[in-house]
Image (cartoon, grey):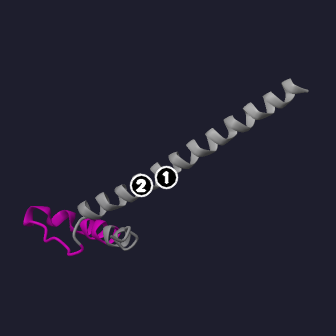
Amino acid sequence: MDTLTVLMQDLLTQNHALRRENEELMDQVRRLLCEKANLLAQVWPPACPVEFPATFKAMQPLAGNLIEIERTTQDHAPAT
């Protein structure tokens, strides 16, 4: 009976240590996600459209689509 009690105590101790480590890892993940959001907010492209040089006039329809896509994704960017 004592062996079983010792085994159970060891398992509970390991479980407690793993739960504590899991909480620490989840906290690190939360901090990393916040840092990523802050960094993305710093490098996010400006909302104003950029005028294309005359040499790119042939690409203007494509550029218009890209600007529209960028505006759409920027609406869903993380808030700072």
Residue with the mark numbered 1: 27
Residue with the mark numbered 2: 31
Identify the image quadrant of residue 66.
Answer: bottom left
Callout 2 amino acid: Arg
| Residue furthest left as drawn | 54
Measured as percent of width and height from the top left, residue 62 is found at 27, 64
Is residue 30 or residue 47 the one in the foreground? 30
Is residue 75 or residue 40 the one in the foreground? 40
Callout 1 amino acid: Asp
Name the quarter where the C terminus is drawn: bottom left
Look at the numbered discs 2 and 1 and tell me whether their residues touch, using CB distance below 8 Å.
yes
At x 84% / y 31%, what residue is drawn?
A: 5
| Left or right: where 58 falls relative to 13 | left
Element class at badge 1: helix
Measured as percent of width and height from the top left, residue 41 is found at 29, 64
Element class at badge 2: helix
Give residue 10's mark. Answer: none
Identify the image quadrant of residue 22.
Answer: top right
Q: How many marks on residues? A: 2
**77 relative to 33, above or below:** below
Q: Which residues are magenta?
A: 47-69
Measured as percent of width and height from the top left, residue 8 is found at 80, 33
Is residue 14 or residue 39 the one in the foreground? 14
Name the quarter where the N terminus is drawn: top right
> Separation of disc 2 and disc 1 at Cα?
6 Å
Is residue 74 or residue 61 the one in the foreground? 74
